[in-house]
Amino acid sequence: MSTNERDFLGIYIDLENVQKNIDIAKLMKDIVVKYETDSSNQEPVYAVKIACGNANSITKFREQLKELNFEIRETPHVTGKKNRSDLIISLDAFEKLFLDRPSINQFVFVTNDSDFTVIMDILRRYGRMVVLVTNEEDSKRSIFNNCSDDIMLIDDYSLGGDSRRRPRPARADERAKEVFKNHEPDDIAIKMCISILRLLDPDREYMVSQIGSKFKEMDKSFDIRKTSFKKFTKLLEYCSEKKLVSVHKDERGNMKFAQINLEDLDV
């Protein structure tokens, strides 16, 4: 695949403003799955991965960041409690915008610091997509909503459990028995499909090919041919039988689908 067939993403993590121990790899995968390109042939990849913080905050995430090939920048406090993470990250993002090498299409900021809204607003002004990953309380602030295209909740990626999740409905366990097969490869495929559907707009319809490519991006090591489904279209048909999605053909004969019933499947 040549470089002109890829769309580039950049992710910046303000470590001192990430209070919980989060699964960074899962967060990055979900961002890639949510990301949409004009061409289904374009593969979204992270061209920039930078995490900033003082020594203590870096220690908390060091192993994850090393495994994910992040550039780690230590930003010690210089005046009281304030460090320079916001300035260093903002300048780097502005430099990428100005130089346009690589040409970043989507910038992701993991923080709850409103100082980042300055660079976020500038990036959007120049046509870049901006995603903010923050806590639920800050996700409701107007200052963040006015300078980002999408906001994701950091609690969804907490390694210590998500206290924000709603209690499972009474019949959720019974429904899970109806949906899953107790066959590990098949159940992994079903869970991956549900995870992708949760990230999509429930009011939109999608081409099967769009979601098939997102399925491959979620875990490139997973081989659907080793499941009883064999093909992604068969997996979608199964999800349709279980009333998780609606599948139909449009006037051109293209197969389309939309999520319809995922509320009580907590995977």
Image (spheres, helix red, strand yellow):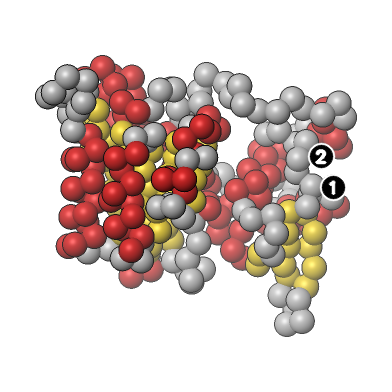
- Give residue 9's quadrant in the image: bottom left
Say whether residue 180 is visible.
no
Frontmost residue, 232 versus 134: 134
- Relative to residue 8, is residue 161 drawn left or right? right
Q: Residue at x 73, y 54 (%)?
A: 259
Residue type at mark 2?
Val
Extreme-left residue of the structure: 78
Of the 4 image quadrants, the one containing the N terminus is: bottom left
Residue 69 in the image: x percent, y percent? 29, 38
What residue is shown with label 2? Answer: 179
Q: Residue at x 71, y 75 (%)?
A: 254
- Relative to residue 3, is residue 258 drawn left or right? right
- Relative to residue 9, is residue 165 drawn left or right? right
What residue is shown with label 1? Answer: 242
Which label sits on residue 251? none
Badge 2 marks a residue whose secondary structure is: helix
Mark 2 or mark 1: whose residue is earlier in sequence: 2
Q: Residue at x 40, y 58 (%)?
A: 129
Say whether residue 87 is visible.
yes
Of the 4 image quadrants, the one containing the C terminus is: top right
Residue type at mark 1?
Lys
Frontmost residue, 13 versus 8: 13
Residue 215 in the image: x percent, y percent? 58, 52
Labelled pair 2, 1 in contact (Cβ < 8 Å): yes
Residue 80 in the image: x percent, y percent? 17, 19
